[in-house]
Every structure is written in structure tokens, then in C-alpha cells.
Image: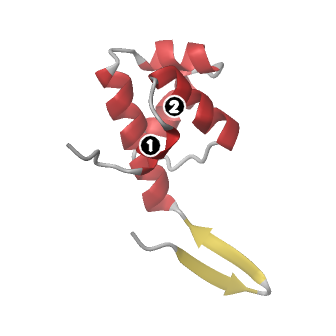
Amino acid sequence: MEVTAVASDAQVIFDNTERFTEIGYAISYYRKKKMLSQEQLAEKVGISRQHMGAIEAPNMNRGLSMDLFLNIAQVLGIEPYLLLKFPPEP
């Protein structure tokens, strides 16, 4: 995966679209593996179902805080790094 950085007037703009999409897919994969609905996972981590849906949706590319990222991994019962590796290794 390539992360693109574009310098513009001394400001760096990162394009993490692909990474956000992969994280969303991973969250969805592990959520379903744990047999949780978006609503159930959202409730456990303290966000709305709509927010969870936006995180998982491949066309939304919504970032999330490190705190929320770690909370999601904890509720899913997995190590956080697994959400950064999609598709999962067998």
C-alpha cells in the first residue's frame, strides 16, 4: 500500500483513503465474526450506529480517533494491529 503525501504551501496533505477503507473492512469482518450488529458494536464503544456504518462503509473514508480504534479492537477481542491488516491472514 502506498501513502501519498502532497506538499502545498508548506502543508502536507495525506491521502489515506485506501487505508481507511481497509480498516473499515477489517472492523466489519471481525464484528461479523463475533456475531455483533453494527448497532451492538456502536453501543459498546459509545458511538451511534450511523457513525459505525460510516466507519465501515468503503465509500465514506471516515477517520477515527486512536481511542475509538483501540476501544473497537478491545470490544472485538482482538489485538489492534489486526485491524490494520486486511484481508486477515489465515
What amino acid does circle 1 point to? Leu
Task: Classify residue 49 as left or right of residue 13.
Answer: left
**Depth check, front residue: 73 or 18:** 73
* Kind of residue at disc 2: Ala
- Asked whether residue 17 is in view, the answer is yes
Q: Residue at x 42, y 43 (%)?
A: 82
Toward the left, the furthest residue is 90
Query: What percent of the width, then of the height, locates residue 85?
Result: 38, 50
Q: CA distance from mark 2 to mark 1?
A: 7 Å
Q: Position of residue 87 (x, y in %)?
A: 28, 48
- The quarter in which the C terminus is drawn is top left
Instruction: Name above or below for residue 86 compared with residue 1.
Output: above
Are the residues tagged 2 and 1 within 8 Å (C-beta)? Answer: yes
Residue assigned mark 1: 83
| Residue visible at 62% across and 82% down in the picture | 6
x and y, in percent, of residue 36 in the image: 39, 15
- Residues 7 and 78: in front is 78
Label drawn at residue 73: 2
| Numbered disc total | 2
Judging from the image, what secondary structure is the residue with disc 2 in?
A: helix
Circle number at residue 70: none
